[in-house]
Image (cartoon, rainbow, N blue to C red):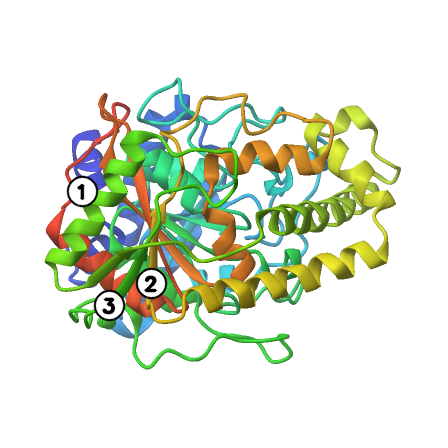
């Protein structure tokens, strides 16, 4: 495989690459070699922090030798090179630092259920992507591995916490990479890097074998992609549950990849451009992007009305802060186990240390109250959405932000999230409510940087159908960042 061919393959999405393998036009091993060439060409982005080339080559060779990569029953993505986020997508026997200096020697002892699903579908895993410590930040600049560069501009963050995955996909290293989303950690980097980023609804996939859920249900796992069909195909791969899971989303009536071929029924869409958090505003370029898509959706036959569902922003912010403080004590406990001693303050990011210390003093009553508050606000939100099928909002309230903004300590965990929510706005509401949400690269700033527009709904099917419809009306496939490897 020469470099020219490797770079040409960057133009083809995951479903397209798998089709080439299935047709016998290329092998899984050749696809992997091409992806490695592109990764080496994009090293300056610092998107991939753990190479797994040997295991990837062994997997690709096994797929080719067994014929599984050409077997349609292996799924629509067999043979496609794939990267795992170094958090929430554990692979037994591989390094798993989760962006933390305290976990710099940690090796995963088990493979996450979703990763087993990826491997069973024939995705060829050959590396792990950069992430901020414990997924705490909506930017990817951990002191352990250094900042990941946004392919659109070195002056703006690629977002986080799935920033390494987003950077690799946006640059064309791979067509898709895994991600996780607790307050916007798939959708924020999708917006910053001009990608498709879907957060599935709560319970769509399993957190087995490690846990029943994460952050009391705020976190969902999925992927960053450049096309809607890749997002749909990957959701087909990970949709499902394991016996003993605490809850599950209703089984879809058809495969998501099949569903996006259908035109969505006319939807009733509520559009909001103002921030849900008082004292924060929405940049005019972002407002314009959302309103343009609202107008387009109207032209496509949907009913779009301006308004906003009701929440108590203080209650939401307080609950999210409390849940994160307690979650970070689990990071401290894991680090203690790995190191064989208690980690020291300088082995954590300053903002993480604030959360850990608060977590040690958070009472059980406060934690239980935060869980109750999340459920109460979910009911309030759902009541405000009565009569509507979907919500149209900004992904970020601002254009892609600079570095050294969304990872800084603010004295308290609540103050930290106040700063985050002044940028991210609506993203956390999908996590709190458990609704599905998707960010689409439908806008741009005056100087060409991407702006994401977000849709939320109780279920993924309608979001993916709307996304496919918008992708057809406003194609983004030809938009390329400055650091595109192709």
Query: Real-space Cα distance between discs 3 and 1?
Result: 23 Å
Mark sitting earlier along the chain (3/2): 3
Q: Residues within 10 Å of mark 2 (few under 14, many from 20)?
A: many
What residue is shown with label 2? 390
Is residue 56 placed above or below 229 in the rendered structure? above
Residue at 14% of width from left, 46% of height from top? 475
Q: If the image is split into quadrants, where does the C terminus sit?
A: top left
Mark sitting earlier along the chain (3/1): 3
Q: Residues within 10 Å of mark 3 (few under 14, many from 20)?
A: some
Q: Secondary structure at mark 3?
A: loop
Residue 266 percent location from the top left of the image:
19, 70
Residue 122 percent location from the top left of the image:
37, 61
Mark 3 against mark 1, which lies toward the viewer?
3
What residue is shown with label 1? 476
Query: Real-space Cα distance between discs 2 and 1?
Result: 22 Å
**Residue 36 vs residue 373: left or right?**
left
Please identify the quarter of the rendering in which residue 465 is found. Answer: bottom left
Residue at 31% of width from left, 69% of height from top? 461
Mark 2 against mark 1, which lies toward the viewer?
2
> Do tag 3 and tag 1 residues touch (Cβ < 8 Å)?
no
Residue 384 percent location from the top left of the image:
45, 64
Residue 377 bears which disc, if any? none
Please identify the quarter of the rendering in which residue 155 is found. Answer: top left
Q: Nearer the viewer, residue 448 or 321?
A: 321
**Residue 260 vs residue 91: left or right?**
left
Q: Nearer the viewer, residue 241 or 384?
A: 384
Query: Is residue 438 at least partly visible in the picture?
Result: yes
Residue at 49% of width from left, 57% of height from top? 310
> Do tag 3 and tag 2 residues touch (Cβ < 8 Å)?
yes
What residue is shown with label 3? 267
Q: If the image is split into quadrants, where does the N terminus sit?
A: top left
């Amino acid at each position: 495989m020469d470099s020219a061919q490797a770079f040409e393959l960057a133009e083809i999405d995951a479903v397209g690459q798998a089709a080439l393998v299935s047709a016998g036009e290329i092998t899984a091993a050749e696809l992997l070699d091409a992806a490695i060439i592109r990764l080496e060409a994009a090293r300056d982005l610092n998107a991939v922090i753990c190479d797994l080339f040997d295991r990837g080559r062994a997997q690709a060779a096994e797929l080719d030798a067994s014929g599984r990569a050409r077997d349609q029953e292996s799924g629509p993505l067999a043979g496609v090179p794939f990267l795992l986020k170094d958090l929430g997508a554990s692979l037994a026997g591989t390094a798993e630092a989760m962006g933390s200096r305290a976990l710099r020697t940690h090796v995963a002892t088990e493979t996450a259920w979703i990763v087993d699903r990826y491997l069973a579908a024939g995705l060829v895993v050959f590396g792990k992507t950069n992430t901020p410590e414990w997924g705490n930040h909506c930017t990817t600049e951990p002191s352990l591995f250094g900042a990941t560069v946004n392919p659109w501009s070195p002056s703006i963050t690629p977002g986080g916490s799935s920033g390494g995955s987003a950077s690799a996909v946006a640059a064309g290293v791979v067509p898709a990479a895994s991600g996780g989303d607790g307050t916007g950690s798939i959708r924020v980097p999708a917006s910053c890097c001009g990608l498709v980023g879907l957060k599935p609804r709560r319970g769509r996939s399993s957190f087995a074998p490690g846990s029943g859920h994460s952050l009391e249900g705020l976190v969902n796992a999925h992927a960053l992609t450049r096309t809607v069909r890749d997002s749909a195909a990957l959701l087909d791969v990970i949709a499902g549950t394991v016996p003993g899971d605490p809850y599950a989303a209703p089984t879809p009536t058809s495969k998501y990849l099949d569903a996006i071929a259908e035109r969505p029924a006319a939807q009733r869409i509520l559009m909001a451009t103002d921030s849900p958090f008082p004292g924060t505003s929405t940049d005019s370029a972002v407002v314009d992007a959302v309103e343009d898509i609202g107008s387009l959706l109207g032209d496509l036959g949907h009913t779009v009305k301006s308004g906003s569902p009701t929440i108590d922003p203080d209650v939401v912010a307080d609950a999210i802060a409390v849940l994160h403080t307690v979650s970070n004590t689990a990071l401290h406990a894991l680090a203690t186990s790995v190191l064989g001693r208690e980690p020291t303050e300088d082995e954590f990011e300053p903002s993480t240390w604030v959360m850990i210390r608060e977590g040690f003093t958070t009472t059980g009553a406060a934690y239980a109250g935060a869980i109750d508050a999340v459920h109460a606000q979910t009911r309030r939100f759902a009541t405000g959405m009565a009569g509507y099928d979907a919500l149209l909002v900004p992904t970020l309230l601002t254009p892609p932000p600079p570095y050294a903004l969304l990872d800084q300590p603010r004295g308290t965990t609540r103050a930290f999230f106040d700063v985050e929510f002044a940028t991210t706005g609506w993203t956390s509401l999908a996590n709190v409510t458990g609704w599905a949400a998707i960010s689409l690269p439908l806008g741009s700033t005056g100087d060409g940087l991407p702006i994401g527009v977000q849709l939320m709904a109780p279920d993924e099917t309608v979001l993916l159908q709307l996304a496919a419809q918008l992708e057809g009306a406003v194609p983004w496939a030809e938009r390329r960042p400055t650091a595109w490897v192709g």
